[in-house]
Amino acid sequence: MIQATLAALLLFGSLIFINIAQTLSLIIRPFSGHLFRRFNCFLAGTWWGWCVRLSRLAGIDVQIKGDPIPYGENAIVFANHQSATDIVMLMFLAFEKGRIGDLKWFVKDALKYVPGVGWGMLFLDCLFVKRAWLQDHLSIKKTFDKIVSLQLPLWLITFPEGTRATPEKLKKSRDYAIKTSRQVFNRVLIPRKRGFVATLEGLRFHATSVYDVTIVYPGTPPTLWEYMQGKARRIDIFVTRFDIKSLPEDSKALGEWLVQRFAEKDQFLSAKL
């Protein structure tokens, strides 16, 4: 408990200083957009790197398995979502592959009003979404166009399920699948196709690969606080890498490709747990 409290105070307290430094970096922006972006990526990578290092110091064993991942390539990364701890696991993966400062996230629009993490993401070209496609798709396209035109290095992180797969949400997802004659999943939610398809269409000629990440916790997925207390001693991350050129170009086929990936995740998690 003491260790977790000290880590939380260090991490969340330091975010205020990160926000101050990010705000001051606005002075640079009119003179060099490139330097402004790289400085903010450095700040983000530094803080996210602390999250990884503190986890290691706490003795948490995170194992990365599956396909070899080239160091430093641009990628779209999607994962199953069970807990806020998933975010730290993706930081681990990015840290190992030289992309910790270049993470960009799909996040809820309300988060941008939250000091610390939310304010910080405003400086990083993250995608704030309201889950209303008519409102979101124009801002998403604008951000993608910016990333492509400036050739920004990135790992774009997305959770296609849209929310954490809690027992209650899994039940609702199963009921919906039965009602609509869809495949029933027991460990994952039915993925949302539209945002994933738009992401591939917007970044197909910028990203090199798509990483399908499956995070496996022993037993019940820990909350972030439980994780910081060291209650999850071993966590496995399985990665499958797809060359982006190998994915379907047709929107409908690409959506079905995503559903198939989650069908495989469901079977994989059922076999592991």
Image (cartoon, rainbow, N blue to C red):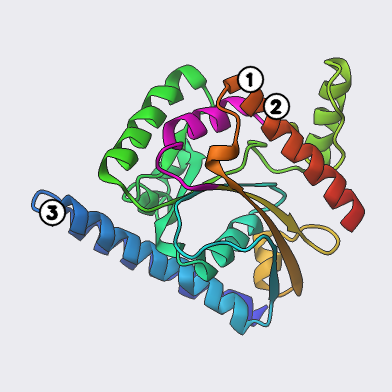
User: Mark 1 = which residue?
Assistant: 252
Q: Is residue 112 above or below residue 136?
A: below
Residue in view at x 60 percent, y 29 percent: 248
Left or right position of 73 against 196: left
Instruction: Using the rendered view, name the quadrant where residue 165 is placed.
Output: top right
Q: Which quadrant of the figure contains the C terminus?
A: bottom right
Q: Dot 1: within a 10 Å radius of its alpha carbon, few (fewer than 14), some, or many (20 or more) residues? A: few
Front one among 141 and 176: 141
Tag 2: amino acid:
Glu
User: Mark 2 = which residue?
Assistant: 256
Q: Where does the image place residue 184, in percent across and percent down from the top left?
A: 87, 30
* Contact? badges 2 and 1 (CB < 8 Å): yes
User: Mark 3 = which residue?
Assistant: 32
Front one among 187 and 144: 144
Q: Secondary structure at mark 3?
A: loop
Instruction: Using the rendered view, name the quadrant where residue 257 is placed.
Output: top right
Residue in view at x 63 percent, y 20 percent: 252
Q: Secondary structure at mark 1?
A: helix
Q: Where does the image place residue 159, in percent across and percent down from the top left?
A: 61, 42
Q: Dot 2: within a 10 Å radius of its alpha carbon, few (fewer than 14), some, or many (20 or more) residues? A: some
Q: Is residue 142 above or below residue 261?
A: above
Q: Nearer the viewer, mark 1 or mark 3?
A: 1
Q: CA distance from mark 1 to mark 3?
A: 41 Å
Q: Which quadrant of the figure contains the N terminus?
A: bottom right
Span colored in magenta: 191-209
The reply to whether residue 232 is in sight is no
